[in-house]
């Protein structure tokens, strides 16, 4: 909601390229695979940078510092500035919720519109976490868009026809397929 209309239109046209090669994001998975004697494989996935929540209809950024490497059709160098801006934007204090853990605490979030941004502030304490991932909807990928410029024009026309820009959430998260 807080991004400019021009940036929203630009982001609507982009597809993110995500990879398990980003060391910090894949280290735990790779450690588990090595321990099990499994062959390490690089996971790569592509999806729109902005996705619409299937239940609320709100828009959310669908990139994260742990996996998003670049934009499709862009080099890493060309993508770097915009991605760094988006990563920093996602963790601004006004967009975050600081969960205070207590014995027996349980936290849930919807990865379709929320990004988990853990803070390692429990040094000296044991942390036990169980992750549950529910099978859900598939991310809608724009079809028939030949270039980012065409996507911006198509989105602008739809917005004008609908008489609105639509709502946007600011944070997003994704998981690479395993």
Image (cartoon, rainbow, N blue to C red):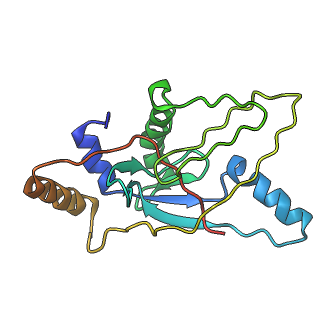
Q: Position of residue 138 (x, y in %)?
A: 46, 69
The one of 160 and 96 positioned closer to us in this rendering: 96
Vertical placement of 40 versus 48: above or below? below
Task: Tell me where residue 175 appears, x and y as whole percent.
Answer: 59, 59
Q: Nearer the viewer, residue 57 or 105?
A: 105
Q: In the image, 41: left or right of 171?
A: right
Vertical order, 37 against 165 (above or below) = below
Residue 162 on image: x %, y %:
12, 56
Residue at the image point whose x is 46% and y is 55% from the top: 75
Q: Quadrant of residue 132?
A: bottom right
Q: Is residue 83 left or right of residue 5?
A: right
- Residue visible at 66% across and 59% down? 20
Q: Residue 176 occupies which quadrant of the picture?
A: bottom right
Tally of numbered discs: 0
| Quadrant of the drawing holding the C terminus | bottom right
Which residue does the image show at 51% across and 67% down from the upper left?
Answer: 136
Quarter of the picture holding the N terminus = top left
């Amino acid at each position: 909601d807080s991004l400019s209309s021009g940036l929203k239109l630009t982001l609507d046209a982009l597809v993110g390229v995500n990879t398990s090669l980003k060391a910090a994001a894949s280290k735990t998975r790779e450690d588990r695979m090595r321990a099990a004697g499994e062959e390490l494989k690089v996971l790569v996935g592509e999806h729109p940078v902005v996705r619409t929540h299937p239940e609320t209809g709100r828009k959310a950024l669908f990139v994260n510092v742990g996996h998003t490497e670049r934009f499709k059709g862009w080099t890493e160098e060309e993508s770097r500035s915009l991605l760094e801006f988006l990563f920093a934007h996602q963790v601004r204090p006004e967009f975050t919720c600081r969960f205070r853990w207590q014995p027996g605490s349980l936290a849930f979030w919807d990865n379709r519109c929320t990004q988990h941004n853990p803070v390692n502030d429990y040094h000296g304490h044991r942390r036990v976490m169980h992750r549950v991932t529910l099978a859900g909807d598939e991310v809608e990928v724009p079809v028939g868009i030949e270039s980012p410029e065409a996507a911006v024009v198509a989105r602008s026309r739809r917005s004008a026809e609908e008489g609105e820009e639509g709502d946007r959430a600011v944070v997003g998260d994704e998981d690479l397929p395993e």
